[in-house]
Image (tube, helix red, strand yellow):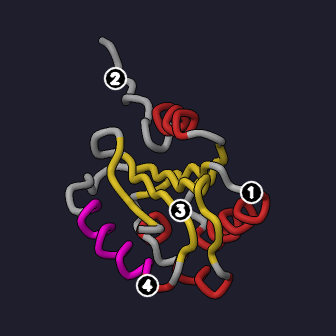
Amino acid sequence: MPISVETLTSDTCLYYRFTGHVRLDDFDALHAAEESACADLPGDRCLGAIADFSALETIGAPLFPRLQHMRLMTDARFGVVVVIGANSYLRALAISLGLTSGTRDFIFRQTLDEALAVLRTHPRVNPAPPVTASH
């Protein structure tokens, strides 16, 4: 499948992997996979997503609106999206999608390990514990 999605790092992150040539019907399969992957995600905290474009060959411009309907763009729980392996064209696409949502930080990295490191330390995904007053 040219687009796959799975949960990573227990229940705090979705990992989207784009490979080969993405077609319209791939988004229908993705939607079903997203429903399954998101079913057990917590509803009370900000989550992260990783969009891995490192093995993507092509995605036609007419499919861009379908990208806007992926869970990582529509689900309010996702506040941080780390994009891996994007060329300048895909970076511009990710930024433009992010600007239309206004609620997500888009960060670009080269590897999955770097992306996971961002999500482990990002304050939206891992907020500091509340400070308690001492008596």
The residue under label 2 is: 132
Q: Which mark is residue 25?
A: 4
The residue under label 3 is: 19
Q: Which mark is residue 54?
A: none
- Residue 131 percent across, percent down from the top left: 39, 25
Mark nearer the N terminus (1 vs 2): 1
Amino acid type of the residue tagged 4 in the rendering: Asp
Q: Which mark is residue 87?
A: 1
**What secondary structure predominates along the stretch shown in magenta?**
helix
Q: Is 32 or 69 nearer to us in this picture?
A: 32
Circle 1 SS class: loop
Q: CA distance from mark 2 to mark 4?
A: 51 Å
Structural crowding at the residue carrying mark 3, measured as other residues with C-alpha within 10 Å and reported as few (<14), some (14–19) or many (≥20): some
Mark nearer the N terminus (4 vs 1): 4
Instruction: State which quarter of the image contains the N terminus.
Output: bottom left
Displayed quadrant of residue 110: top right
- Residue 38 percent across, percent down from the top left: 28, 61
Q: CA distance from mark 4 to mark 1?
A: 24 Å
Amino acid type of the residue tagged 2 in the rendering: Thr
Magenta segment, which residues?
Answer: 26-38
Magenta stretch holds residue 114: no
Displayed quadrant of residue 9: top left
